[in-house]
Image (spheres, rainbow, N blue to C red):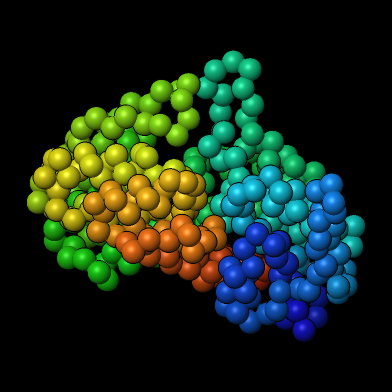
Amino acid sequence: MSAFSIDNSKNLMLFSGRAHPELADQVAKELDVQVTPQTARDFANGEIFVRFEESVRGCDAFVLQSHPAPLNTWLMEQLIMIDALKRGSAKRITAVLPFYPYARQDKKHRGREPISARLVADLLKTAGADRIITVDLHTDQIQGFFDGPVDHMHAQGQLAQHVRNGYELENITVVSPDSGRVRVAEKWADSLDGAPLAFIHKTRDPLVPNQVKSNRVVGEVEGRTCILIDDMIDTGGTIAGAVKVLKEAGAGDVIIAATHGVLSDPAAERLAASGAREVVVTNTLPIDEDKKFPQLTVLSIAPLLARTIREVFENGSVTSLFNGSA
């Protein structure tokens, strides 16, 4: 069976795109269900075909899809899966996007630019999604782009617990890679028994993507273990530059903690050579063997996703998963 019942009127079914089947299997195990079997294939011209092998009529459907490269393919596949569920008379459809695609394009920096994060929300709604579950959006405002409930989960609890288990809290300083993430760093500091804060003042050329010039550290880091936090690591240039600045300021060990390990080339090489003692990410995105390096630690986001799915299915409180801190 690919579903379980709380009562006779409700039926949870989990569906997975092809981008990250390992994560779907982990979530299914946590929920004690099976991923619903489906046929999915690509036609010669790149078109995607999906058909579910079981009836979905009246079910509470959760469609899990990660969005690594090629991101557009996996986004289209998720939209097609949602459309198939809508046309198959699913009762409610929740799109589960551990890594929200196009999240960095959440506003217009200059004229004649798109707001692609809003477009993605519109596409999901048009396809038939009633609800979204996602993890650590690039900015909170993206929640307002979707005309329906958005459960915005945070991996900070798991990442911070990993730090608590591995490092002496008395000597920790939480470091934001820029002034814009100081609020997130404050939450981190609270979860690490009131650790002091620092941030890196940096400049970015809006005409040159993925390139940042790091300047100086604001805050006391000399001799301290620095937890450098961010929502994602793409090419690794920003975060590797931040490690360099911290080391030049006399920091001791530097631990990088980020939710999404995009790790576009040459991120693995940059991070491996950055001088960071450990780089901790979650598996919201699949991390291929060629992207792994000795300092990398990957935590599973599956328990958080599974608990969220269960609360949504049972009409419980997702906020309770934050222990009242959401």
Quarter the N terminus occupies: bottom right
Left of 116 or right of it: where is 238? left
Q: Residue at x 69, y 62 (%)?
A: 18
Q: Depth check: 278 or 289 in front?
A: 289
Q: Is residue 254 visible?
A: yes
Q: Residue at x 46, y 50 (%)?
A: 263
> x, y (%) of residue 63?
71, 61
Q: Is residue 101 above or below residue 162?
A: above
Left of 81 or right of it: where is 55? right
> x, y (%) of residue 198?
22, 42
Quarter the C terminus occupies: bottom left
> x, y (%) of residue 318?
55, 62
Q: Depth check: 81 or 275 in front?
A: 275
Q: Residue at x 25, y 69 (%)?
A: 166
Name the quadrant containing residue 58.
Answer: bottom right
> x, y (%) of residue 142?
57, 40
Q: For the image shown, how many numbered marks are present on the structure?
A: 0
Q: Depth check: 116 or 49 in front?
A: 49
Q: Is residue 28 above or below residue 15?
A: below
Q: Is residue 58 visible?
A: no
Q: Residue at x 61, y 57 (%)?
A: 66
Q: Is residue 122 above or below residue 203?
A: below
Name the quadrant containing residue 42.
Answer: bottom right
